[in-house]
């Protein structure tokens, strides 16, 4: 079992630095774009239809990739260009350098391209004595600052206008009346002039490609500045570098992507420039020195298709989906943790954000994803925004699982032998072991809960949790209840004699062992509506181990849970779930862990508690049977996975019918995210996200606060220093 105490302290310190120095700019920019994207998609009726079409095109293209490479080779050659297939980054850089030498070129103007960032072409050419200039405004800023991009499409998103002005003034020696202000328009005009001069001077232009059409050799360039197409056609030599996954079969296949990429990535209906080039282009070559145009026959075009691990990803059943990514950056914009630390925190060697983990593991190796992977908490808010419907949380879980298996065991292993399932490696990180096995620990502690709580909360107990397991010293793990929910219900028994319906109330881990009061409230609400409740002895859903990348443990628990619950489903009983993350397991994640028929059956009979109660009211039950509070104001925060499942509206409507005046936070995620906020290295990130939630909710004096998720309740408890109930507790008729 592995300990990373020193690494954790260093990681925590770096996150604090990023939050302080880059957090404001990244947060403001990503949240603004995320809101614009929300608005654009709300007005776009064809979103899901085109999303499905885009996914289908990418699936087909990746399946037929070898044939498409051959097809585009023929098309480009017929157009007078040349295709080079580079197996590695080194191969790609060698090819670029050879082209530069053949053209007797010295300067290269380059448009924005994450693929060229991946191969580090700038560094390679500069070390060989060539002059490289970035022409995208954000990339130009980053090049001057000698930094790495912080976002897939907004490389300088972490910089404020004031910081950019300071950078330009310093780099170009601008002082006094010549110094630039932080006015964005002034900064843009200055950069445009500088970049334009360098494009005109360049011997070679280099672009990436958003898509490459196999049948015609056409490149699609999607930008908001227009510098990409200037770079492509101003010099007489054009080099395009694209990953092999950018290939699509035909021109008609571009349509759904054209409709989607701007709406999800920037919140625009369409970007300012969508350029379709079929090189060699017929445009005459401008000669600025002679003030004339040369014939287009002087043009030279090279398409470098990069493998660099992609064909291996294509054969990897779990990482293959990463290749469907169209690099829009929507997953980063929707991610609360990314909003807090940006891509310099949530990033690897090249790629950033949720989808970046898959790219890093695929093209740079699994270790390259290790520092960024845990920042994906599986909150799922990126999923609805992905224009190709990629299951980004699952990719991160798979990478986490593989990273777990890279760790060697240590001398601590004998202490916990037998407490982790045989499916998991003995070298599992101690912190992940603790939070992945919380059910086992809760079972042991619940035998003597007061003693367990006293030990956990004592000075030595906290120091042990911090030093051995990396639990943040400023966070207190929840206390075990004196009596579990199942013990309470076993002693009490059902209260409905002649029920209209029977249901199973799933005793999730937190409700059962730590907060049975919300479970009791759920029982009383259901009984008040003439529903008989059953609470079986059943395992934790697998959410805890899955969040730590312990996939086989989660699968084992899912099988046990299904085996228990299906006997009730067979008797006509639906499954009612209090904790949204467990509802997400039953409705979504189990499709990865169980046979399809089993997963579909449980999903079709599972309901989140407020969703189920709402259904009862819609079918004739009276809200007066519940606790009502006419005119009482409630500030409500919906759980992230509850939002993804589109269940939040049921809670809002239910509270409204009960007489509450409800206002709901707009924040994607509370930041606590299960165990994430308890971990030493991520506690400050969780706090930063939590502060944004507090800013969103504002002052709540005179209001009730309610939250659907365990983590949300915990975070809001700390933010407002008062108990925060589950919404079902507001409806409790006791």
Image (tube, rainbow, N blue to C red):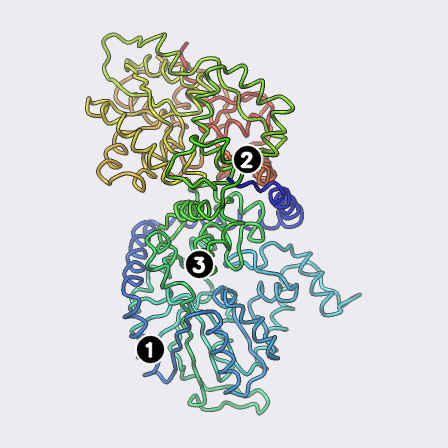
The dot on residue 712 is none
Q: Is residue 189 above or below residue 500?
A: below
**Left or right of 37 on screen, residue 458:** right
**Could you classify mark 3 by the number of other residues whose Cα lies within 10 Å: few (under 14), some (14-19), or many (20 or more)?**
some
Report crowding for label 1: few under 14, some 14 to 19, many 20 or more residues within 10 A (C-alpha).
Answer: many
Find out whether the residues at labels 3 and 1 contact each other: C-beta distance under 8 Å.
no
Q: Nearer the viewer, mark 3 or mark 1?
A: 1
Question: Which of the pair 180/468 is nearer the observer?
Answer: 468
Horizontal and vertical percent position of residue 645: 36, 37
Decide: is 201 above or below 381.
below
Secondary structure beneath dot 3 equals loop
The secondary element bearing badge 1 is classed as helix
On residue 327, which mark appears? 3
Q: CA distance from mark 2 to mark 1?
A: 50 Å
Q: Residue at x 26, y 36 (%)?
A: 599
Is tag 3's residue or tag 1's residue first in the polypeptide sequence? 1
Q: Is residue 644 left or right of residue 32?
A: left
Is 504 situated left or right of 228 in this image? left
Q: Which residue is mark 1?
A: 73
The circle on residue 677 is: 2
Residue 175: give x, y in percent of width and height: 78, 66
Distance of label 3 from label 1 (alpha carbons):
24 Å
* Image position, residue 132 (x, y; %): 59, 75
Q: Could you say whether the residue bearing mark 2 is in a helix, strand or loop?
A: helix
Considering only order in the chain, which callout, 1 or 2, is on the residue closer to the N terminus? 1
């Amino acid at each position: 079992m592995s300990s990373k105490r020193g690494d954790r302290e260093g990681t925590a310190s770096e996150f604090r630095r990023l939050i302080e120095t880059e957090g404001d700019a990244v947060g403001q920019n990503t949240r603004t774009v995320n809101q614009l994207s929300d608005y654009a998609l709300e007005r776009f009726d064809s979103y899901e239809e085109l999303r499905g079409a885009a996914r289908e095109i990418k699936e087909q293209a990746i399946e037929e990739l070898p044939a498409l490479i051959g097809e585009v080779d023929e098309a480009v050659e017929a157009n007078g260009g040349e295709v080079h297939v580079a197996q590695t980054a080194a191969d790609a850089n060698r090819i670029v350098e050879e082209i530069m030498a053949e053209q007797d070129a010295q300067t290269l103007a380059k448009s924005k391209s994450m693929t060229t960032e991946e191969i580090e072409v700038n560094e390679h050419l500069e070390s060989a004595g060539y002059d490289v200039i970035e022409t995208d405004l954000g990339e130009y800023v980053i090049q001057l600052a000698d930094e790495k991009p912080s976002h897939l499409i907004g490389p300088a998103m972490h910089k404020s206008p004031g910081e950019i002005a300071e950078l330009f003034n310093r780099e170009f020696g601008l002082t006094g009346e010549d110094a630039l202000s932080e006015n964005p328009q002034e900064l843009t005009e200055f950069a445009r002039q500088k970049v334009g001069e360098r494009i005109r001077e360049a011997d070679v232009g280099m672009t990436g490609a958003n898509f490459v059409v196999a049948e015609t050799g056409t490149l699609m360039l999607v930008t908001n500045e227009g510098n990409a197409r200037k770079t492509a056609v101003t010099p007489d030599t054009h080099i395009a570098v694209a990953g092999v996954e950018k290939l699509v079969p035909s021109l008609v296949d571009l349509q759904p992507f054209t409709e989607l990429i701007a709406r999800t990535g920037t919140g625009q209906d369409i970007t300012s420039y969508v350029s379709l080039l079929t090189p060699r282009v017929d445009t005459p070559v401008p000669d600025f020195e002679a003030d004339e145009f040369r014939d287009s026959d002087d043009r030279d075009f090279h398409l470098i298709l990069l493998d660099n691990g992609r064909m291996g990803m294509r054969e990897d059943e779990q990482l293959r989906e990463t290749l469907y990514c169209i690099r829009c950056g929507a997953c980063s914009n929707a991610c609360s943790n990314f909003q807090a630390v940006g891509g310099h925190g949530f990033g690897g060697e090249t790629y950033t954000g949720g989808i970046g983990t898959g790219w890093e593991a695929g093209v740079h190796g699994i270790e390259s994803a290790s520092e960024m992977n845990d920042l994906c908490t599986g909150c799922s808010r990126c999923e609805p925004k992905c224009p190709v419907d990629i299951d980004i949380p699952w990719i991160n879980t798979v990478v986490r699982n593989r990273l777990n298996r890279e760790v060697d065991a240590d001398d601590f292993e004998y202490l916990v032998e037998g407490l982790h399932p045989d499916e998991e490696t003995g070298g599992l990180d101690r912190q992940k072991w603790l939070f992945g096995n919380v059910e086992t620990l809760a079972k042991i502690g619940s035998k003597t809960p007061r003693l367990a709580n006293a030990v956990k909360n004592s000075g030595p107990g906290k120091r042990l949790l911090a030093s051995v397991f990396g639990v943040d010293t400023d966070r207190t793990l929840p206390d075990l209840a004196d009596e579990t929910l199942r013990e309470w219900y076993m002693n009490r028994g059902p209260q409905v004699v002649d029920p209209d319906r029977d249901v199973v109330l799933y005793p999730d881990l937190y409700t059962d062992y730590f907060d049975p009061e919300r479970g009791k409230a759920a029982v009383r609400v259901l009984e008040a509506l003439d529903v008989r409740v059953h609470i079986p002895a059943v395992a934790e859903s697998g959410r805890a181990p899955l969040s730590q990348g312990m996939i086989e443990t989660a699968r084992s628990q899912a099988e046990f849970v299904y085996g228990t619950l299906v006997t009730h489903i067979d008797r006509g009983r639906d499954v009612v779930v209090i904790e949204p993350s467990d509802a997400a397991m039953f409705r979504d994640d189990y499709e990865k862990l169980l046979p399809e028929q089993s997963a579909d059956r449980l999903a079709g009979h599972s309901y989140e508690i407020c969703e189920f109660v709402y259904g009862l009211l819609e079918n004739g039950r009276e809200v007066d049977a519940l606790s009502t509070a006419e005119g009482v104001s409630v500030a409500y925060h919906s759980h992230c996975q509850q939002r993804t499942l589109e269940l939040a509206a049921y809670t809002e409507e239910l509270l409204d019918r009960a007489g509450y005046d409800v206002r709901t936070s707009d924040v994607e995620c509370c930041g606590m995210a299960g165990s994430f906020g308890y971990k030493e290295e991520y506690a400050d990130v969780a706090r930063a996200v939590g502060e944004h939630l507090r800013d969103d909710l504002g002052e709540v004096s005179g209001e009730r606060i309610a939250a659907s998720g365990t983590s949300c309740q915990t975070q809001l408890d700390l933010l407002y220093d008062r108990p925060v109930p589950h919404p079902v507790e507001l409806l409790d008729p006791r």
